[in-house]
Image: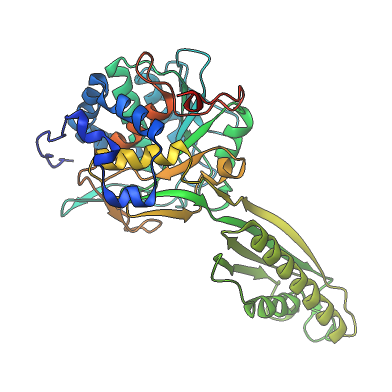
């Protein structure tokens, strides 16, 4: 496959342009910047090695896109990420993280050690896609766009991490904080954030987190939409449709429950939603159903509203079962609630240095920050734990996520890894240049307070 040539290197290397007071007014209105954060970010961005690393990222972007394509063509269906994880560990090791490994959950992990006694920062992108194993993931170039399922979500994020690692290794920069790089499993669908949940279980010392997910750098995700997903499982004895007529039906009970849930009214703010996404059950057209099941997805930006919605849905199902049992001569239907997904609600306030550092990175690279968004990403987990966390995109242009026609175009795509690098270095600190913006939660120390 041939790759289009990118424009010549055009990165502005004047450190003064990185000062936040000269930054984008839109970013400043969305994220007010504290003076100590601005000073440390300016010190990091002005360091000649950082400027060289930013230039190196742009110069190597063609190879970053090629790496993105190679990984896209390694299938990574939900719960079947092993092949891509194995390849990713090889790439982490090839870029200097010699002790990279795959953990018990399937995450590919590499650690770049800091100078010692500093905080710990995690940056991650997810390995899995939404597509089943039989999906053709061959990348095709058409009209300047690369088409393939999963090429943006989130193979772009994986490529960004590798670019950042390579820039750090080539620059010789020593950070104060330890930096964990992870290609994690289980972000999509029924993966239930199992990969990032395992990371925070196994590394309780993590003090801050960034996930790189998708393309189009225009927002910072600072809040996490929570979700609770269940299978409502209805069961009874079943029987012949004619000979056993008068026996309660699991499918009839399920239908009553769905009808009741369908009449719910939920708040527009905080946004709270629900849908019955799949249904199944029964044996044949001439059988009274002995079993039936539906899967329901409930979401909210508010923890209390999500809990209330779950309570209402379960109550509706119990009421429907009671009505079905009362309707017939032999009513013995029951319902069980099987939790299949739990994404916690969370938020990182704009007062956190992490959010401010990301806004400053956008400004310094000339990227318009259009919004602070709420979404459902790997950041939900640390946000819910009170750990500063955000999600940013990986750069470039794209569309069609979660569809066979997903596409990616490398339009100024180097801005993705450049943004990630600046955020990582601002939070991790550079030995001899700037202390970390990241709070070491274990020690309780915050050097910003002493500035």
Can see residue 154?
yes
**Residue situated furthest left in the rendering:** 8
Q: Quadrant of the C terminus?
A: top left
Q: Position of residue 308 (x, y in %)?
A: 70, 65
Q: So how many labels did they put on this image? A: 0
Query: Is the N terminus in the top left, top right, bottom left or bottom right quadrant?
Result: top left
- Quarter-of-image position of residue 275: bottom right
* Left or right of residue 403: residue 324: right
Foreground residue among 238 and 6: 6
Q: Nearer the viewer, residue 270 or 191?
A: 270
Vertical comparison of 122 with 393: above or below: above
355 up-or-down from 230: above or below: above
Name the residue: 25% across, 34% down.
18
Is 226 in front, or is 239? 226
Q: Residue at x 40, y 20 (%)?
A: 93
Quick one: which residue is furthest to the right in this view?
329
x, y percentage for residue 180? Answer: 47, 26
Q: Is residue 415 visible?
A: no
State the scheme by which the image is colored.
rainbow
Relative image position of residue 107 (x, y in whole percent):
52, 33
Q: Which residue corresponds to the image point at 35% horizontal and 25% vertical from the top-left?
A: 165
Tell me residue 230's x, y (percent): 67, 60
In the depicted structure, whether residue 173 falls above or below residue 5: above
Quarter of the figure with residue 316? bottom right
**Quadrant housing residue 161:** top left
- Give the side of residue 303 with respect to residue 183, left or right: right
Residue pictured at 34% horizontal, 59% vertical = 400
């Amino acid at each position: 496959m041939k790759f289009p040539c990118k424009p010549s290197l055009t990165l502005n290397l004047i450190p003064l342009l990185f000062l936040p007071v000269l930054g984008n007014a839109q970013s400043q209105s969305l994220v007010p910047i504290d003076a100590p954060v601005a000073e440390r970010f300016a010190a990091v961005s002005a360091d000649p090695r950082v400027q060289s690393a930013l230039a190196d990222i742009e110069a190597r972007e063609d190879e970053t896109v090629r790496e993105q394509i190679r990984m896209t063509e390694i299938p990574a269906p939900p719960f079947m990420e092993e092949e891509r994880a194995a390849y990713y560990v090889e790439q982490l090791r090839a870029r200097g993280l010699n002790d990279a490994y795959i953990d018990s959950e399937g995450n590919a992990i590499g650690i770049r050690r800091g100078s010692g006694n500093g905080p710990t920062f995690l940056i991650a992108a997810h390995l899995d896609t939404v597509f089943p194993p039989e999906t053709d993931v061959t990348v095709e170039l058409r009209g300047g766009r690369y088409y393939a399922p999963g090429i943006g979500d989130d193979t772009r994020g994986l490529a960004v991490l590798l670019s950042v690692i390579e820039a750090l290794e080539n620059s010789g920069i020593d950070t104060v904080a330890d930096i964990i790089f992870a290609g994690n499993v289980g972000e999509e669908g029924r993966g239930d954030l199992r990969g990032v949940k395992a990371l925070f279980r196994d590394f309780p010392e993590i003090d801050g987190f960034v996930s790189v997910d998708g393309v189009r750098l225009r927002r910072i995700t600072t809040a996490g939409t929570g979700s609770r997903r269940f299978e409502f499982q209805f069961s009874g004895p079943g029987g012949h449709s004619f000979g056993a007529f008068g026996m309660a039906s699991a499918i009839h009970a399920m239908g009553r429950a769905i009808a009741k849930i369908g009449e719910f009214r939920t708040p527009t703010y905080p946004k709270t939603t629900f849908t019955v996404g799949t249904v199944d059950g029964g044996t044949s057209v001439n059988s009274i159903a002995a079993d039936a099941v539906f899967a329901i997805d409930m979401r909210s930006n508010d923890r209390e509203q999500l809990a209330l919605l779950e309570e209402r849905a379960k109550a509706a199902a119990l009421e429907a079962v009671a009505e079905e049992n009362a309707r017939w001569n032999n009513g013995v239907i029951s319902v069980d609630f099987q939790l299949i997904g739990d994404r916690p609600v969370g938020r990182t306030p704009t007062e956190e240095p992490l959010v401010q550092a990301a806004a400053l990175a956008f400004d310094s690279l000339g990227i318009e920050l259009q919004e602070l968004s709420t979404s459902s990403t790997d950041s939900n987990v640390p946000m819910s734990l009170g750990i500063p966390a955000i999600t940013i995109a990986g750069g470039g242009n794209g569309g069609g996520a979660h569809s066979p026609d997903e596409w990616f175009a490398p339009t100024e795509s180097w801005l993705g890894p450049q943004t990630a690098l600046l955020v990582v270095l601002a939070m991790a600190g550079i030995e001899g240049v700037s202390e970390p913006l990241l709070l070491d939660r274990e020690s309780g120390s915050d050097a910003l307070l002493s500035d």
